[in-house]
Amino acid sequence: MRVSKAVIPAAGLGTRFLPATKATPKEMLPVVDKPAIQYVVEEAVSAGIDDVLFITGRSKRALEDHFDRNLELETVLAEKGDRERLAGITASNDLARIHYVRQGEALGLGHAVSMAERHVGDEPFAVLLGDDLIDPRDEVLPDMIAAREAVGGSILCLMEVPREQISLYGCAAVEPTATDGLVLVTDLIEKPAADEAPSNWAVIGRYVLDPGIFAVLKRTTPGRGGEIQLTDALRELAHGGAVYGVAFRGRRYDTGDRLSYLQAVIRLALERDDLGPALRDWLPSVLAAPATKETP
Ligand code: G1P
């Protein structure tokens, strides 16, 4: 069955980015001139998904407004004849059919995903975590969807990280399969200490899940941090031999982390025709100059 629906959990409080996220959802922080979340929705659409369900919480109204029309702005820009900006603000309206469900209580990622059961029904579906920005040139979701079509089960996106960083991620124990780039996941641990991690393979925020996950989530008890963890439910499926991993070796940024967020902004701005050349010229002078006053 085709993967046509994506679930995007977006109920988090964004505490790593306070005070910027006091009144603005973290998903709306701009990466160059687009909110981080728009890259994520565009990635899903580019993989053939046409239906997106956001799991939101309180103070996420800006998300709904962003993916809706803004008639006042449209009128002003149309009157000015500013076609480029007009295209920019309407681009997010028709990306996909977008739906929202509120989580109510932040009980963990597993709980957030379980809120999607009614909408998703009995189909495989994608989950994209908004903090993970996959460079649009290195998309991995199509490979994951192809893997689901080939082997069934649930498909994770795995990235090798230095051992000292594994405690920030879900970690997978893996075995090779006959297919290059596809591994069998034999065990999963949410955010293990470096010396308890079974490997350096970190779970990145892209999943193609079998709808069987919903039944497992119902009986998953709170795990790490007292939260219902998606990793724990996937672990049960992995023990049944039905979880695979696609190795990701592309560029990925954690836009929920301040340093990685700045790196994403700079990397993507450098690639742009309108901003890249000027930024490229300016950067060496900042790096060379002592950190005092602004260079022109
Ligand atoms: C979540 C998952 C974790 C995964 C990570 C990827 O953690 O629980 O298994 O490795 O996303 O970004 P979070 O970063 O939301 O704490």
Image: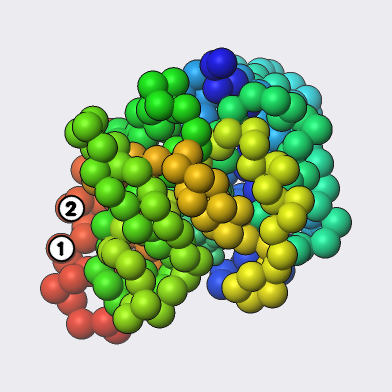
Query: Is the residue 111 above or below the residue 290 in the image?
Result: above
Residue type beneath disc 1: Pro
Query: Is the residue 210 above or below the residue 161 in the image?
Result: above
Can you tell me whether the CB of the residue at mark 1 lies under 8 Å from the nearest atom of ligand 1? no
Query: Is the residue 273 above or below the residue 202 in the image?
Result: above
Q: Which residue is rendered at x = 27% and y = 82% of the image?
A: 291
Instruction: State which quarter of the image contains the C terminus.
Output: bottom left
Is any part of residue 64 visible from this angle?
A: no
Q: Are marks 1 and 2 in contact (CB under 8 Å)?
A: yes
Residue type beneath disc 2: Asp
Q: Which residue is rendered at x = 25% and y = 69% of the image?
A: 162
Instruction: State which quarter of the image contains the N terminus.
Output: top right
Gap between marks 1 and 2, in whole Å?
Answer: 7 Å
| Residue at mark 2 | 281
Q: Residue furthest front?
A: 240
| Residue at mark 1 | 284
Exactly how many numbered labels are in the figure? 2
